[in-house]
Image: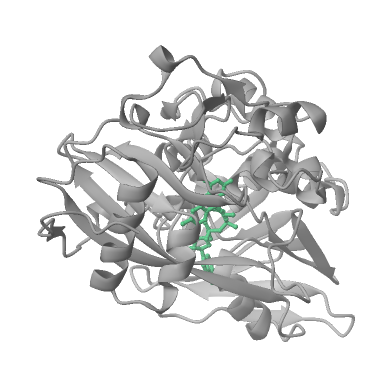
Amino acid sequence: MKTLRPDVVIFGGGVAGLWTLDHLVERGYSALLLEANSLGHGQTIACQGIIHGGLKYTLQGVFTSAADQIRDMPAIWRDRLRGRGRPDLSDVTIRANCCHTWRTARLRARAGEIGARLSLRVRPVRLPRDQWPQPLHGCPGDVFRLDEQVIDPGSLIDGLAAGHRDRILQIDAAKSIDWEREGDGNAVGVRMAHADLNEAIDLRPRDIVLTAGSGNETLRTSLGLPPHAMQTRPLHMVMVRGGLKTLNGHCIDAAMTPRMTVTSASDDHGRTVWQLGGKVAEDGVNMGGTELIELARRELAAVIPRMTFSGLEWATYRVDRAEAATSDRKRPSDVQVQRDANIITAWPTKLALAPRLAERIAESLRPPPGVAPFPFDMLSDWPRPVTARPPWEMEQTWIADRWEKPACN
Ligand SMILES: Cc1cc2nc3c(=O)[nH]c(=O)nc-3n(C[C@H](O)[C@H](O)[C@H](O)COP(=O)(O)OP(=O)(O)OC[C@H]3O[C@@H](n4cnc5c(N)ncnc54)[C@H](O)[C@@H]3O)c2cc1C
């Protein structure tokens, strides 16, 4: 059995684990990342990729703690996407440089005033009609531009993993991991085997970081850590593809809450796919696929007045948001980092908050000991994980649009 002594072992290669890996390597830690499925599997590959700046959390006119934590993120991401600073994300696909917000009713939109009054760094800008995105041409109220970029999560995963492939290992879900813990609670040994190899490795890290999304709870249980540290909040997302124009943004209802979030991607055949999230994905959790598609279709007809449905195809997917547990089961307003002896469990809460999470994790670690270079060549045979495929490329039953007229609300 090979024995290796990295400073840190990270479990989970979504945006949280991969951003943290880069951050720690830059700071001189010898770090390894272990992935049980494919990189980004779970939330990151399924997400809508919006780099939020906080407007969503201030729509009621109140500056919330969530808005405070996230308002600096768009500028950090913009720099990284331009190749300034670490990680270098200049190869990541930017799906859109801005989002749009719009209303369903001819009410005066307050979004612009709210953004200015609450000192958001990304403020909505009211657009003249000739600059509205094509799908919104029939909208009765104002349309705003919001400089929140939309990125392609798959290329983000690739961009974060590039340069660290020697530090990222596939772990075999079918073979259990043997932990070695000491009386003080420290986990000092991680012993693991892989079915493709005839050998096991024994990792003896100083610290362990769990960034496995919804997998954190199982990892914590296997380590004997206190249960119920995590909550999951399910979503049932809708996808629609076909002759669609690009649209990214939020429709805000009369009560100033986000009614639907639409983001656009391109599939492997060059078709535009819209991901429909927000309230519809929460309301759809207890619905079957067809029932939810009917709801989403009614909602789209209501929020995009000139929407045409002929030739479109529909599908849905389910995914859980995984976060630190809160007493009211609502979304935590910030990243969450919890330490138990030398084990750190972390959830970013939002993709946009990954840079902040990586800093928090680094702050809670002991400084790197700065000893001999890590012998990565000893791991050269070990299998490496691939990047997860987006939901619309997974095996899916797509339903052709068969409803003659959209039923109106
Ligand atoms: C539908 C949806 C839309 C969203 N849209 C946005 C958005 O537009 N903007 C935004 O900022 N946020 C958004 N979010 C939130 C964002 O996606 C998440 O906060 C973020 O992706 C979480 O990243 P993560 O790395 O913690 O978890 P995950 O992405 O879930 O990654 C966890 C990783 O750990 C691996 N793993 C699991 N168990 C183990 C184990 N035992 N050992 C090793 N590895 C393991 C998994 O395979 C996976 O690779 C959205 C979330 C959802 C669900």
Q: Residue at x 40, y 70 (%)?
A: 284
227, 4: nearer the viewer: 227
Asked if residue 2 shows in the view, the reply is no
42, 114: nearer the viewer: 114
Looking at the picture, how far across and down is residue 77, in whole percent? 62, 29
Q: What is the basis of the colouring in this image? A: one colour
Q: Which residue is drawn at 60% across and 47% down?
A: 375
Looking at the picture, how far across and down is residue 106, in whole percent? 50, 36
> Relative to residue 9, is residue 310 drawn left or right?
left
110, 84: nearer the viewer: 110
> Relative to residue 253, is residue 117 drawn left or right?
right
Q: Decide: is 78 above or below 306.
A: above
> Relative to residue 65, is residue 324 drawn left or right?
left
241, 142: nearer the viewer: 142
Question: Which residue ends up furthest to the front in the rendered image?
Answer: 106
Asked if residue 23 shows in the view, the reply is yes
Q: Quadrant of the N terminus?
A: bottom right
Q: Which residue is drawn at 67% across and 38% down?
A: 55
Q: In which quarter of the image is the C terminus?
A: bottom left
Looking at the picture, how far across and down is residue 274, in whole percent? 31, 44
Looking at the picture, how far across and down is residue 148, in whole percent? 57, 30
Q: Decide: is 236 above or below 114.
A: below
Q: Decide: is 56 above or below 388.
A: above
- Badge count: 0
